[in-house]
Image (spheres, rainbow, N blue to C red):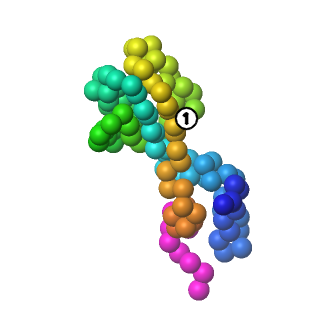
């Protein structure tokens, strides 16, 4: 698996950097995976009311997933708010969205391939 990518289109360097940085530059955001011991409904409601968060979902068990569009400082504030509200967070994992290299390439080049 690569840690750095460079995308060239028409002989010009379009973008380069880590997969996370390139994906974030595209506005793809990140997927948040949060596990809590209890108070799941409170955590879900708080996340739904938080700027930069969308598509909050909770299926079964202790896992909450959400789409996050902010920067690392906003991410820190979300975790701090959960903890301040006595929600027992046991894991807080931001994951890059659109992590597939092909998807990133197609988004950057708008699907145009060399002929």
Among the 4 quarters of the image, the one containing residue 5: bottom right
Residue 55 on the magenta span = no
Residue at 60% of width from left, 81% of height from top? 114
Q: Position of residue 88 (x, y in %)?
A: 42, 20
Could you tell me how many numbered marks the image carries? 1
Q: Position of residue 81 (x, y in %)?
A: 44, 19
Residue at 44% of width from left, 34% of height from top? 34
Query: Which is more toward the observer, 29 or 2?
Result: 2
Question: What secondary structure prevails in the magenta region?
Answer: loop
**Lateral position of residue 36 relative to residue 105, left or right:** left
Residue at 56% of width from left, 52% of height from top? 23
Q: Is residue 42 above or below residue 72?
A: above
Q: Is residue 49 above or below residue 5?
A: above
Q: Is residue 27 visible?
A: no
Residue at 54% of width from left, 25% of height from top? 76
Q: Is residue 70 above or below residue 96?
A: above
Residue 114 on the magenta span = yes
Q: Position of residue 31 (x, y in %)?
A: 46, 44
**Lateral position of residue 19 relative to residue 43, left or right:** right
The range drawn in magenta is 107-115
Is label 1 in a helix, a strand or a loop? Answer: loop
Q: Is residue 115 visible?
A: yes
Residue sitting farthest toward the bottom: 115
Quadrant in the picture for the C terminus: bottom right
Instruction: Identify the residue under disc 1.
Output: 71
Query: Which is more toward the observer, 108 or 103?
Result: 103
Q: Position of residue 87 (x, y in %)?
A: 39, 19
């Amino acid at each position: 698996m690569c840690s750095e990518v460079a995308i060239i289109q028409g002989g010009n360097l379009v973008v380069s950097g880590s997969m996370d940085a390139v994906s974030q530059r595209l506005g793809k955001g990140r997927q948040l995976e949060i596990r809590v011991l209890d108070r799941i409904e409170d955590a879900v409601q708080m996340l739904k009311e938080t700027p930069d968060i969308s598509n909050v979902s909770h299926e079964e068990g202790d896992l909450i997933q959400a789409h996050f569009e902010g920067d690392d400082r906003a991410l820190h504030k979300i975790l701090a708010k959960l903890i301040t509200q006595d929600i027992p967070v046991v894991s807080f994992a931001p994951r890059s969205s659109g992590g597939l290299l092909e998807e990133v390439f197609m988004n950057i080049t708008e699907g145009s391939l060399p002929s």
